[in-house]
């Protein structure tokens, strides 16, 4: 459910709404210190004192914050505490997944890899408590055309955000509707609008080909798919469902408000728009320091250009998708895209500026996905950003599936947990609100029959290979509440001692 990484001596959680930090270990920078100041054999370095379990220099504190002698103590090294699971008490099993797939000329290998990885993706989702969610799966291309200009592959409004359901592989069977529907019944059967294997049906409609527009507009295409303009897409977006948006592209977003940006009459470096190439998307959609996009060399501090005369600001799309749900945390986004750096402007064979690849693999290259990265980061705790520059996308698609599983609600405990287990379990109501309430849950005093325990509400941790086959521990936590009304949004937060990660 959670991947742990070390960032300057702190434990952080990737892809889940709760972030835990801890000061632990015998070396490395610690909160409240700078440079090489660190724990030394369980005590603070010379000149530092312990305050709230962190080594600090009193000279760095304002006078009002300096503690008295009774508050100071030797600073010993505690074991790491880390949040290892956040489990909703009410699991929403309805999930609408929109795949936005680049169908320009360089995407053949990546589309094939996505098709071959779909089974692995669905297997992760099938291990959610209760099995495979109630799915809608739709596919759109990144092609919304280039307005009135006659550009190869860019006709009119392109696919315009219409869900694609045409069979793309010889002999395959698409779903009966515009999108795939696979809904579970209480008796364990499922209502589907397709025949055969789900992964095969998705592959049938998702391998879009490479004839689409080279000015990719994935964010605009996703918006058009969901804003109600396309009657063909009706029924895909359910008001009560979680929404997942998955982007696959080796180019950055070029979502354009003013289609005059594609003016084919301008094709000289001296023209205001410059040569007709995808470099225009960087030129008018990204700003770096200094702001001289057509000058060759390495660029620094690159970010979306919010005052572009031609392209939509990224915030338009963050606001739109968050606004589709009463609770913005019901929107999950993920990208298999180009690394955001390095950003280097080079020249093509005509000595015109071009954006150099930020990463490459045997499957091809990708340019920096600066606008796409910014979009994904607009959904904190609900995003997965992975690179398209691998031999295949199977690892990336698995990370995305794990994120979806964690948001829907997985009881699995992740991380290098200490032996024996040392965990604290809290019931958290009204999450993130001023009225947030926390209460600690005890371990059930009757683990063989938790519902018969005398100390309800309580929890039990047990090994569950079927539910948690891919985690380090293969342990699952189950909470058993007393007979009470549980407010919407209540979660169970599990905090355990974890071993040091190098």
Image: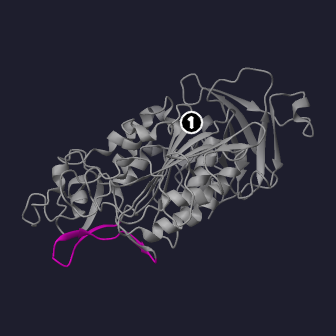
Q: Is residue 349 magenta?
A: yes
Count of numbered labels shown in the rendering: 1
The quadrant where residue 355 appears: bottom left
Q: Secondary structure at mark 1?
A: loop
383 or 6, which lies in front?
383
Q: Residue at x 57, y 22 (%)?
A: 435
Instruction: Describe residue 476's horizontal placement relative to residue 208 as left or right.
Output: right
The residue to which callout 1 is attached is 241
64 or 82, which lies in front?
82
Instruction: Describe residue 216's horizontal placement relative to residue 385 as left or right.
Output: left
Q: What percent of the width, then of the height, locates residue 15?
A: 55, 49
312 or 4, which lies in front?
312
Q: What percent of the width, then of the height, locates residue 165?
A: 48, 52
As displayed, is residue 232 above or below residue 468?
Answer: above
Is residue 8 visible in the rendered image? The answer is no
Instruction: Describe residue 427's horizontal placement relative to residue 223 as left or right.
Output: right
As displayed, is residue 63 above or below residue 245?
Answer: above
Task: Please provide the residue range marked out in magenta.
Answer: 342-362
As displayed, is residue 173 above or below residue 313?
Answer: below
Is residue 194 visible in the rendered image? The answer is yes
Q: What percent of the width, then of the height, locates residue 240?
A: 56, 31
10 Å crowding of disc 1: few (<14), some (14-19), many (20+): some
Colour mapping: one colour
Instruction: Describe residue 362's horizontal placement relative to residue 135 as left or right.
Output: left
């Amino acid at each position: 459910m959670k991947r742990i990484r070390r960032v300057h001596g702190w434990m952080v959680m990737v892809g889940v709404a709760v972030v835990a930090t801890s000061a632990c270990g015998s070396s490395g920078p610690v909160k409240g210190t700078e440079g090489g100041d660190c724990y030394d054999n369980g005590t603070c370095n010379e000149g530092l004192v312990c305050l709230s379990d962190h080594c600090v220099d009193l000279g760095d504190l304002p006078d009002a914050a300096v503690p008295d002698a009774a508050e100071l103590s030797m600073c010993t090294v505690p074991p790491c505490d880390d949040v290892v699971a956040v489990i909703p008490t009410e699991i929403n099993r309805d999930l609408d997944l929109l795949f936005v797939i680049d169908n320009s000329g360089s995407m053949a290998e990546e589309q094939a890899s996505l098709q071959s990885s779909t089974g692995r993706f669905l297997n992760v989702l099938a291990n959610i408590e209760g099995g495979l969610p109630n799915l809608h799966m739709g596919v759109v291309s990144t092609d919304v055309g280039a307005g009135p200009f006659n550009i190869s592959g860019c006709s009119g409004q392109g696919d315009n955000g219409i869900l694609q359901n045409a069979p793309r592989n010889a002999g395959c069977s698409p779903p009966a509707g515009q999108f795939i529907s696979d809904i579970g019944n209480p008796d364990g059967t499922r209502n589907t609008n397709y025949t055969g294997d789900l992964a095969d049906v998705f592959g049938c409609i998702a391998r879009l080909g490479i004839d689409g527009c080279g000015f990719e507009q994935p964010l605009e295409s996703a918006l058009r798919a969901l804003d109600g303009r396309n009657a063909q897409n009706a029924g895909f977006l359910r008001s009560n469902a979680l929404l997942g948006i998955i982007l696959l592209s080796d180019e950055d977003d070029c979502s354009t408000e003013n289609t005059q940006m594609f003016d084919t009459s301008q094709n000289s470096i001296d023209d205001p728009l410059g040569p007709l190439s995808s470099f225009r998307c960087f030129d008018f959609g990204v700003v770096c320091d200094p702001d001289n996009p057509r000058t060759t060399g390495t660029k620094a501090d690159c970010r979306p250009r919010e005052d572009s005369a031609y392209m939509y600001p990224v915030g338009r799309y963050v606001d739109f998708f968050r606004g589709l749900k009463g609770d913005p945390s019901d929107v999950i986004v993920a990208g298999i895209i180009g690394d955001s750096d390095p950003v280097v402007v080079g020249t093509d064979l005509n000595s015109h500026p071009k954006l150099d690849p930020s990463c490459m693999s045997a499957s091809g290259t990708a340019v920096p996905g600066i606008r796409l990265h910014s979009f994904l980061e607009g959904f904190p705790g609900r995003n997965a950003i992975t690179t398209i520059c691998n031999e295949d996308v199977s690892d990336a698609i698995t990370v995305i599936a794990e994120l979806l599983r964690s948001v829907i609600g997985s009881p699995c405990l992740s991380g290098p947990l200490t032996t024996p287990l040392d965990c604290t379990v809290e019931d958290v109501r009204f999450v993130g609100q001023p009225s947030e309430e926390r209460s600690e849950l005890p371990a059930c005093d009757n683990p063989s029959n938790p519902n018969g325990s005398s100390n309800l509400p309580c929890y039990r941790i047990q090994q569950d290979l079927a539910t948690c086959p891919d985690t380090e521990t293969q342990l699952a936590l189950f909470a058993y509440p007393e007979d009470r009304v549980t407010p919407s949004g209540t979660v169970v937060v599990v905090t355990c001692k974890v071993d040091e990660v190098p």
